[in-house]
Image: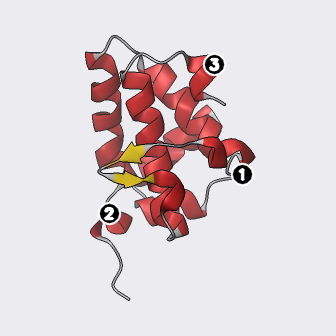
Amino acid sequence: MPTHRIYAMKFANVYPLYVQKAERKNRTQEEVDQVICWLTGYTQAGLQQQIEQGNDFETFFAQAPAMNPNRSLIKGVVCGVRVEEIEDPLMQQIRYLDKLIDELAKGKALEKILR
């Protein structure tokens, strides 16, 4: 089965887009980092190291210290697909992150985003 192009995309290239999306809605880079760290278990230093190393999404999630057990509570639609129905585990993790960034950008309270 062919892999998706997003798996090979560098997380460091997409990260600034996450930050821009949040900042356009008066959210901060710190909030973006907090959401990413909540989902993946990275510390701030670990997240920064992933960005500096230029790892792709596949490596980024493979090296994540501890995916949050509450991530299954993330529900909703991203790119026309329900995140809870995605069968590919890596694609689901990527879409979980997309959904969390969307919620942040839509002004949802951080306490509600970090289920």
**Figure quadrant of residue 115:** top right
- Dot 2 alpha-carbon crowd within 10 angstroms: few under 14, some 14 to 19, many 20 or more: some
Amino acid type at image mark 3: Glu
Check disc 2 and report the residue beneath it.
6
**Figure quadrant of residue 63:** bottom right
Label 1: state its secondary structure: loop
Extreme-bottom residue of the structure: 1
**Residue at mark 1 to residue at mark 2: CA–CA distance:** 21 Å
| Residue 111 visible in the snapshot | yes
| Residue 41 visible in the snapshot | no
Q: Earlier in the sequence, mark 1 or mark 2?
A: 2
Q: Is residue 71 left or right of residue 95?
A: right
- On screen, residue 79 above or below 32: below
Indicate the position of residue 71 as horizontal and vertical percent values. Answer: 64, 46
- On screen, residue 67 above or below 37: below
Foreground residue, 115 or 37?
115
**Residue at mark 1 to residue at mark 3: CA–CA distance:** 20 Å
Label of residue 111 in the image? 3
Q: Is residue 113 left or right of residue 57?
A: right
Check disc 1 and report the residue beneath it.
66
Indicate the position of residue 22 as horizontal and vertical percent values. Answer: 34, 23
Q: Nearer the viewer, mark 1 or mark 3?
A: 3
For the residues labelled 1 and 3, say whether their Cβ atoms are less than 8 Å apart: no
Residue drawn where x is 34% and y is 35% of the image: 18
